[in-house]
Image (tube, helix red, strand yellow):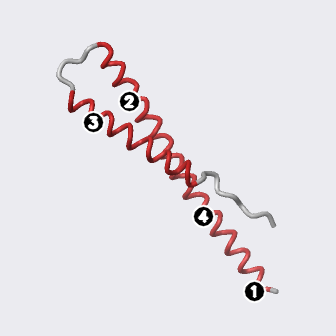
Amino acid sequence: MQKYRRRNTPAFTILSYFTLFAGVLLFSIGLYNADNLQLNEKGYYIAVMLLCIVGAILTQKVARDNAEDSEILAEQDRKYNQSTKEL
C-alpha cells in the first residue's frame, strides 16, 4: 500500500501565510503614510494589492489542501489499523 504524501510542504505553507501578512502590512503602512498620491505611489499600491491578492489565494489553497490531506491521512490510518487488527 502506497503512503499518501501531503501536497504542501511546511515551507510552502509558511510562505503563503507570510505573503498574505506581508502584503497587508505593507499596504497598511502605505495607507498610513499617504497624503497626496503621485503616479509612482499609485503603482506601489497596485503592486501591493496584487501581493495581497496572491497571498489570499495561496493561503486559501494551502488551508484547503492541508485540510483535505489531513482527512485522507486519517482515512488511511483507519484502514491500516483495521487491516492490522484483522491479522
Q: Is mark 3 on a helix, strand or loop?
A: helix
Mark 2–mark 3 Cα distance, whole angstroms, equals 11 Å
Q: Which of marks 1 and 2 is nearer the N terminus?
A: 2
The residue closer to the viewer here, 82 or 3, is 3
Q: Is mark 4 on a helix, strand or loop?
A: helix
Q: Name the residue under label 1.
A: 85
Mark 3 or 4: the one toward you: 3
Question: What is the C-alpha distance between the residues marked 1 and 3?
Answer: 56 Å
Query: Which numbered circle lies on residue 49?
Result: 2
First reached walking from the N terminus: tag 2 or tag 3: 3
Identified by mark 2, the residue type is Met
- Choose the circle earlier in sequence order: 2 or 4: 2
In the image, is residue 6 above or below residue 58?
below
Which amino acid type corresponds to the residue marked 3 in the rendered image?
Ser
Q: Mark 3 points at which residue?
A: 28
Q: Quadrant of residue 38?
A: top left
